[in-house]
Amino acid sequence: MKNSLRCLLILGVLLSFFVPGISQEYPLKKILVVVEGSSDLKNYAMGDGRQLAELLGHFNTAVTVKGVNKYFPGEVNTFDFTFYIGFNPRDAVPPKFTDDVLSTSKPVIWMNTGMIEFSKRSNLRKKFGFSVSTLDSLDDFNYVKSNNKVFTKGEPNANIIEISNRRVVEVLAVAYSSRKRREIPYIVRSKNFMYIADSPFASATENDRYLLFADMLHDILHEQHEESHSALIRIEDVDPLSESRPAARHCRHFIKPRNSLPCRSNSVLCRPVGRNPREFVRQTGFCRRDQIHGEERRNDRHARHHTSVQRNHSRRFRILG
């Protein structure tokens, strides 16, 4: 799980550099990300909030992340967009925020929990044409479908959306349980309000609904970018002793036959796994066996030198991408 979160953070940062300069063509947007609870970094909801802030860095935005406990009444109207992220199933969002959600004309995107209690306190059916009744943790919703595309859903739970007025509610994506053969609304939009029935960051994998959400941000923020099919590949358990198939050969094997994309390898952070697993060592010559575009420049003497230097720590190394 920690590795998955680390990969998502790295991917979010890299995505912000894949399309340089394009976001500057759009006006700066002020974004407020409000999460359940406090602004303390020990608050798990803040983890989702910070991951969202990384994704928003792909756009021309100024992002503020805070716990709802620090929210001030009327603050939503001072930002262009507001996101709310819940975490606990019984999340009771304070009225100072929910009252603003009901009254504001600014776009609000709500993710995951908090909507059940919100629906009980307020007449969301009349305001938005839908409500949220319960959290389903039994039916195992493992796919998300949108515009003829199918994504995996690593988090099987989903908040159940009940639509009362389909004339004002647009279903943008549905969640599907292959075990129960049941389909439910997953992302809905009504007027200036959008709701997502879980956290797209939870248990995300390489083809998860997280990708759908990341792509939808272009429509949400009204900032369209030219498609860029850059890719980040993480190859684990590759070290100087991998004589038969070094890192760049792995890279060419997975990429070149399919898309004719250039294969690049770079220095990475290596962590010894053994007697001193907390020591991090940046070993350029140790980890980088080949160079740009798959051109092999094998420097075995240099690699063996770094191997001998590190034997006092461990004989096995794991590459962190």
Image: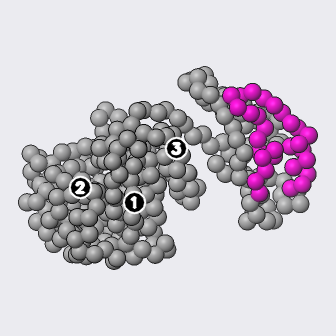
The vertical placement of 34 against 6, above or below, is below
Residue underneath mark 2: 107
Residue 297 magenta-drawn?
Answer: yes
Which sits in the foreground, 140 or 315?
315
Q: Position of residue 95 (x, y in %)?
A: 21, 75
Which segment did they paint magenta? 281-310
Type of amino acid at the residue the image marks with label 3: Phe
Alpha-carbon span between mark 2 and mark 1 = 15 Å
Tell me the quarter of the picture where residue 239 sits.
top right
Q: Which residue is denoted by mark 3 in the rendering?
A: 17
Q: Is residue 285 left or right of residue 136?
A: right
Kindly indicate the quadrant of the structure image that contains residue 297: top right
Residue drawn at (44%, 67%) of the image: 46
- Closer to us: 88 or 52: 52
Q: Amino acid at mark 2?
A: Pro
Q: Which mark is residue 266?
A: none
**Are the residues flagged by discs 2 and 1 in contact, CB closer than 8 Å?**
no
Mark number for residue 63? 1
- Quarter of the image holding residue 196? bottom left
**Looking at the image, residue 78 lies above or below residue 310:** below
- Which of the two discs, 2 and 1, sits closer to the camera? 1
Q: Earlier in the sequence, mark 2 or mark 3?
A: 3
Of the residues tagged 2 and 3, which is closer to the observer? Answer: 3
